[in-house]
Image (cartoon, helix red, strand yellow):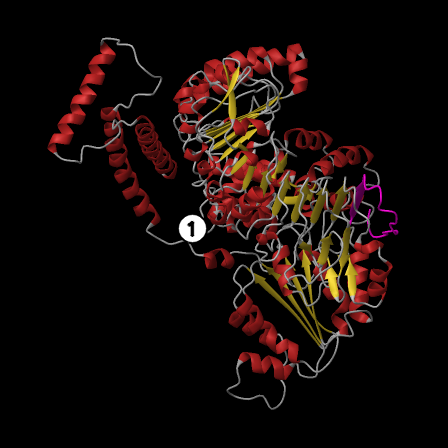
């Protein structure tokens, strides 16, 4: 029934979405074809007459003036009535079956296994160094000197936090008069926890009869050294935590300890007493995990002795477990009953049969339980990760854009953008341990999904998501409820002709006979292109008209791959990668996909221009292309009011027409006025602006989500200094701006919003290129001047992280004032082509005297210093803190 209900909800969503598509089409074309008959009798007659005329015209096969889709109002109405009738029947049955019982977190908590201080594993593997560190710290080291230390132990579910803490507890409990072990679980309630704690603390003489729990805890522990373990904390609430910890902080002795175990780094950071009091448990190394796995199968005493042939297979199984003690323990217990049956080990290795045992608790109970505890929106976001291949590296916006395409990001308030929501969801999934955040060499983050968690995603999404590859094409199950499909073409299969023919046959059987293509909302293609499969795809996806997201990471021509591309009225996200995709240019067909939010063609080479009617994509948020110059070709870009990035807007752009250049309407600065959701903006050819009132029409001050701004004056002609000063002054951005480029400005003055009346105090990146200013802004307490340093305003760029000065003609000295911190956050400083530069702050001996005296902190975070083509800068001291 639930699957039926979900299917009807999807059908209803499709109908409403189709109506929205035709409403947008009416708005663009100035028609009223999608309007309902609610405006009165006369209006209804007129509308019905129009619909009748269109129907007659279609039967007479009159030529159409456009390629627009036609709305069948009768069919849509019937469909809506049918869905409503079915929903009523199914909802009644579901309500009766569920008995309207609300979901409550406490019910989950009641069924979580309770932990105890007694060790369930007699031997600890791969944690000796960390165990010794904590034990030594408690008995005689850094923890014993403080009145109270809160030590969090953090790691993903199933990594062995409880087992590790049990070993710590057993080794040190003799050092404490009162050792206490509490299993917190999901329901963090200070009152309940205090009751449980009191039961484990011996009573003392003279206790007050009406004392509160907190007072009793304080009285019983007043002069006693205690150890409190709070195992498995899932959430942190500041008031509850303070209430719970308060009586423990009032003890008179030293060396008191509170050890907290949690899966969530955010919780650990909030409860720890000091930054150095936090221990992270990671995956076990292959050697330690193999020993533990062997012990689970054969026992702790020399587990692999006499079992060499099993050890070889066991080593390969352990490689699959990716350092997870939980998985090793589960699989080891599975094979304990087959410790002499090598063929069974080989079958387990080859078929992953252990994943399909009797219940979730058989393999990954902690991971499944973690998933069950996630808020519904995070469950959704995580489950769609199953669509990607294993070990896939997600860029930040790759996941966010997918979620936008699936319409599963919902803001809490109007001040929060969709991207803010996506970033918050990402951080939540990292915090919950479902994604791991890494950093590339260039500093950009990316995210990875552990293999076991990928398998969990596949399992929990199996009713809606199917991922087909060479290894599972025969065994894959495709339920009728599937709405999301990904296909990975293995290169090995394609290169092996015999294997490929077999694969193709199985593939066609799996998809052609079992998949309801018309229900697909997501299509992802990974791997290598092959012509035979391409033709199969073309035939298969003709009826895939409900698609909302399409990601093609192989060299397929999209118009051929999706013959009905123009009919994808629901499409939100289209991403095409690697080489071929459109031929030479993006086809104008794209301009009829009115609900498209993200068009990602940035890895498609050879595109020279955008579709003529791209401004019809009124919901477009991201137009990602290989060359920013393409953005400059959007005529009347102001109609794309939801656009997030416009990397190049050329003021009064001239286009080629009959071998001549002519100015075209639609490239005036007022086009930018309504683009209030922009996050990245580049304005070029500002030399074409004639009056400052034009600059005011950009409305930059109202763009509170703008993070990156480029202002470029480079155009042919003579610079007019006074005129350009006024223009720049009127281009004042919102104070939220983080990155700013100013190039080719011919004026003599720094704008007041960057100088005397600094308003962009959150700026992190500043690039000045070919500016002729006589008075440069005060940067982080340093003043860039021509000859002398006069009194300057106190406002500074306290958040600046990167500064680039290129061809700054009048820069001669860059001097600092005493008793200030200079660029405490600056990491990169680049100075190039400053021909008159004579002195930098850190090349002045006086500054070094100030630094030695403790009055000046010069570039304490600087990592990269690059100076080029500054011929009269004669002296530069060593800067050992850079790279």
Q: Quadrant of residue 517?
A: top left
- What residue is at 79 percent from the left and 36 percent from the top? 311
Q: Give the structural element (helix, strand or loop) at label 1.
A: loop
Local crowd at mark 1 within 10 Å, few (<14), some, or many (≥20)?
A: few
The number of numbered discs placed on residues in the rendered structure image is 1
**Depicted 668 relative to depicted 58: above or below:** below
The residue that disc 1 covers is 414
Residue 371 makes an appearance in the image: no
Q: What quarter of the picture does the N terminus occupy? A: top left
Residue 867, image x and y in percent?
Answer: 80, 43
**Residue 877 lies in the magenta stretch:** yes
Q: Toward the viewer: 784 or 672? A: 784
Q: Toward the viewer: 328 or 279? A: 279
Residue 502, image x and y in percent?
Answer: 60, 13
Residue bounds of the magenta highlight:
862-883
Residue 272, image x and y in percent?
Answer: 67, 65
Residue 241 makes an appearance in the image: yes
- What residue is at 63 percent from the left and 42 percent from the top? 741
**Depicted 374 relative to depicted 81: above or below:** below
**Residue 139 lies in the magenta stretch:** no
Residue furthest to the bottom = 206
Q: Quadrant of residue 251?
A: bottom right
Residue furthest to the left = 41
Q: Toward the viewer: 322 or 110? A: 322
In the drawing, does residue 462 fall left or right of residue 97? right
């Amino acid at each position: 029934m639930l699957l039926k209900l979900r299917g009807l909800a999807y059908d209803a969503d499709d109908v409403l979405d189709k109506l929205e598509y035709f409403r947008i089409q009416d708005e663009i074309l100035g028609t009223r074809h999608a309007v309902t008959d609610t405006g009165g009798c006369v209006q209804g007659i007129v509308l019905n007459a129009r619909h009748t005329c269109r129907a007659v015209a279609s039967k007479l096969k009159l030529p159409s003036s456009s390629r627009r889709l036609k709305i069948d109002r009768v069919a849509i109405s019937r469909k809506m009535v049918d869905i409503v009738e079915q929903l009523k029947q199914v909802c009644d049955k579901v309500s009766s079956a569920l008995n309207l019982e609300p979901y409550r977190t406490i019910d989950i908590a009641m069924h979580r296994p309770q932990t105890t201080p007694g060790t369930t594993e007699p031997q600890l593997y791969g944690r000796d160094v960390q165990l010794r560190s904590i034990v030594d710290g408690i008995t005689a080291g850094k923890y014993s000197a403080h009145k109270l230390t809160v030590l969090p132990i953090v790691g993903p579910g199933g990594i062995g936090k409880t087992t590790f803490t049990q070993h710590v507890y057993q080794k040190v409990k003799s050092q404490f008069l009162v050792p206490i072990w509490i299993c917190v679980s999901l329901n963090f309630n200070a009152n309940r926890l205090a009751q449980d704690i009191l039961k484990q603390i011996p009573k003392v003489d003279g206790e007050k009869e009406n004392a509160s729990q907190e007072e009793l805890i304080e009285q019983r522990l007043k002069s006693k050294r205690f150890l409190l373990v709070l195992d498995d904390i899932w959430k942190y609430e500041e008031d509850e935590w303070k209430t719970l910890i308060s009586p423990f902080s009032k003890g008179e002795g030293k060396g008191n300890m509170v050890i907290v175990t949690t899966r969530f780094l955010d919780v650990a950071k909030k409860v720890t007493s000091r930054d150095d009091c936090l221990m992270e448990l990671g995956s076990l190394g292959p050697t330690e995990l193999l020993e533990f796995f062997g012990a689970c199968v054969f026992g702790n005493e020399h587990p692999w002795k006499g079992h060499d042939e099993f050890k070889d297979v066991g080593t390969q199984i352990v490689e699959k477990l990716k350092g997870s003690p939980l998985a090793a323990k589960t699989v080891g217990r599975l094979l304990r009953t087959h410790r002499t049956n090598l063929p069974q080990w080989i079958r387990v290795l080859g078929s992953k049969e252990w994943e399909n045992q009797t219940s979730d608790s058989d393999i990954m109970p902690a991971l499944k339980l973690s998933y069950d505890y996630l808020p519904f929106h995070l469950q959704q976001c995580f489950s769609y990760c199953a669509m990607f291949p294993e070990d896939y590296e997600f860029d930040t916006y790759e996941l966010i854009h997918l979620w936008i395409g699936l319409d599963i990001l919902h803001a809490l308030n109007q001040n929060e953008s969709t991207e803010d929501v996506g970033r918050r969801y990402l951080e939540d999934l990292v915090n919950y341990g479902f994604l791991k955040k890494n950093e590339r060499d260039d500093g950009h983050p990316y995210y990875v999904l552990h293999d076991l968690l990928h398998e969990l995603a596949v399992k929990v999404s199996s009713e809606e998501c199917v991922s087909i590859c060479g290894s599972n094409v025969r065994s894959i199950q495709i339920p009728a409820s599937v709405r999301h499909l990904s296909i990975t073409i293995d290169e090995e299969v394609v290169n092996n002709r015999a294997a490929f023919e077999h694969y193709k046959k199985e593939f066609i059987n799996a998809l052609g006979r079992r998949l309801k293509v018309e229900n697909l909302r997501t299509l992802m293609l990974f791997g290598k292109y092959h012509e035979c499969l391409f033709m199969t795809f073309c035939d298969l996806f003709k009826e895939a008209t409900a698609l909302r997201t399409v990601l093609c990471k192989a060299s397929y021509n999209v118009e051929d791959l999706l013959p009905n591309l123009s009919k994808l009225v629901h499409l939100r996200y289209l991403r095409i990668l690697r080489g071929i995709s459109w031929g030479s240019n993006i086809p104008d067909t794209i301009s009829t996909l009115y609900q498209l939010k993200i068009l990602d063609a940035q890895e498609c080479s050879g595109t020279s221009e955008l579709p003529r009617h791209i401004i019809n994509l009124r919901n477009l948020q991201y137009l990602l292309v290989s060359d920013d110059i393409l953005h400059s070709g959007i005529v009347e870009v102001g109609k794309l009011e939801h656009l997030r990035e416009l990397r190049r807007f050329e003021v009064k752009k001239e286009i080629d027409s009959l071998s001549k250049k002519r100015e075209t309407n639609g490239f005036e600065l007022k086009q930018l006025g309504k683009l209030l959701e922009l996050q990245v903006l580049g304005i070029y050819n500002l030399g074409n602006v004639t009056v400052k009132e034009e600059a005011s029409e950009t409305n930059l001050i109202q763009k509170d989500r703008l993070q990156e701004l480029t202002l470029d004056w480079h155009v042919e002609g003579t610079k007019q200094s006074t005129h350009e000063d006024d223009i720049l002054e009127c281009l004042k951005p919102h104070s939220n701006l983080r990155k700013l480029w100013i190039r080719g400005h011919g004026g003599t003055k720094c704008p007041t919003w960057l100088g005397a009346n600094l308003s962009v105090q959150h700026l992190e990146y500043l690039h000045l290129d070919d500016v002729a200013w006589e008075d440069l802004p005060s940067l982080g307490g340093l003043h860039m001047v021509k000859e002398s340093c006069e009194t300057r305003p106190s406002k500074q760029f306290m958040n600046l992280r990167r500064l680039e000065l290129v061809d700054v003609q009048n820069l001669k000295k860059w001097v600092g004032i005493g008793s200030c911190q200079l660029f405490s956050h600056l990491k990169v400083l680049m100075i190039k082509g400053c021909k008159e530069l004579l002195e930098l702050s850190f090349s002045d001996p006086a500054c070094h005297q100030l630094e030695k005296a403790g009055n000046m902190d010069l570039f304490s975070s600087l990592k990269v210093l690059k100076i080029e083509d500054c011929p009269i800068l004669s002296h530069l001291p060593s800067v050992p803190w850079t790279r």
